[in-house]
Image (spheres, grey):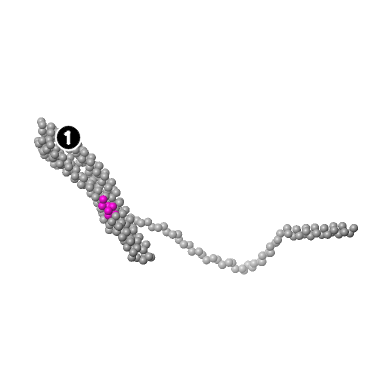
């Protein structure tokens, strides 16, 4: 009879021990309290101040004066030629017009004087004018009284001389348009020669510094030549159209005036 009681006692003891172990595991672990610090404790040393570096400055752009200085003497020659071409182009744009070279008032007055029989007055009026039409009509009046082909040949010869003069006046712009790129190419070749000379003769540390001005000269002179040639060529082609209009207008007026002189001779 004692065995069951002993067995129950042992089971109860085991359960009590297990419950105690489980409670010990679930209890929170308290950290040890920090040691009290004294009021006289010294603060940590301050870190040294960090030096602020200024932001990198933006690269400087090349100004117009820098380009002119780096372009050298070739660029100065190109600029002088461009200035002369610009002045001449403005003069031609103002003076080379159909209204100036072929004034309708002159043609009407000359025809009126021929109809009135005042050939001498018409000839003097044409001699006083410097227009192309005045020169052509004056050459026809000078041969008044001759056969038709003689008058026509005189007027055609004077018209050809006047047209050649007009073509020569605008040909200077075409010459500038041709020489501008050639000067720019010459500056390019000269600058590249200086750059390759720096590569061959300078040390490795200064090669880039020695090459930069030469390459800048090459590029600047090329740009300068194109800046002169493109406007000159544009104005030349525009004035060429004006010259063709002037020649056509002179031919029309000269043909009408020739018919008038021929009719006058027949009368």
Q: Is residue 174 above or below residue 256?
A: below
Residue 190 in the image, given as x and y percentages of width and height: 29, 59
Identify the main secondary structure in magenta. helix
Please report the residue visible at 28 percent of the width from the left and 46 percent of the height from the top. 234
Please report the residue visible at 17 percent of the width from the left and 41 percent of the height from the top. 159
Instruction: Tally the marks.
Output: 1
Q: Is residue 24 visible?
A: yes
Mark 1 packing: few (<14 Cα in 10 Å), some, or many (20+)? few
Please report the residue visible at 15 percent of the width from the left and 41 percent of the height from the top. 157
Q: Is residue 155 magenta?
A: no
**75 or 29, which lies in front?**
75
**240 or 28, which lies in front?**
240
Q: In this picture, which residue range is highlighted in magenta? A: 178-184
Query: Is residue 178 shown left or right of residue 24?
Result: left
Quarter of the rendering containing residue 257: top left
Q: Is residue 89 above or below residue 216?
A: above
């Amino acid at each position: 009879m004692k065995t069951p009681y002993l067995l129950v006692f042992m089971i109860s003891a085991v359960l009590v021990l297990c419950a105690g172990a489980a409670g010990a595991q679930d209890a929170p672990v308290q950290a040890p309290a920090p040691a009290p610090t004294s009021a006289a404790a010294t603060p940590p040393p301050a870190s040294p101040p960090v030096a602020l570096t200024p932001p990198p400055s933006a690269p400087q752009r090349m100004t117009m004066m820098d380009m002119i200085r780096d372009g050298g003497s070739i660029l100065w020659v190109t600029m002088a030629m461009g200035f002369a071409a610009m002045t001449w182009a403005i003069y031609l744009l103002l003076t080379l017009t159909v209204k100036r070279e072929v004034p309708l008032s002159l043609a009407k007055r000359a025809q009126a004087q021929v109809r009135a029989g005042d050939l001498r007055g018409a000839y003097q009026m044409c001699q006083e004018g410097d227009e192309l039409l005045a020169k052509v009509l004056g050459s026809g009046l000078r041969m008044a009284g001759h056969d038709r082909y003689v008058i026509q040949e005189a007027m055609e010869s004077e018209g050809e001389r006047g047209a050649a003069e007009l073509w020569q006046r605008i040909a200077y712009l075409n010459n500038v348009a041709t020489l501008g790129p050639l000067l720019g190419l010459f500056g390019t070749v000269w600058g590249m020669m200086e750059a390759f000379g720096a590569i061959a003769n300078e040390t490795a540390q200064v090669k880039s510094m020695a090459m930069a001005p030469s390459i800048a000269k090459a590029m600047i002179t090329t740009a300068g030549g194109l800046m002169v040639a493109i406007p000159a060529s544009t104005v030349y082609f525009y004035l060429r159209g004006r010259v063709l209009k002037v020649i056509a207008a002179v031919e029309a007026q000269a043909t009408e005036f020739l018919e008038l002189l021929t009719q006058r001779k027949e009368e």
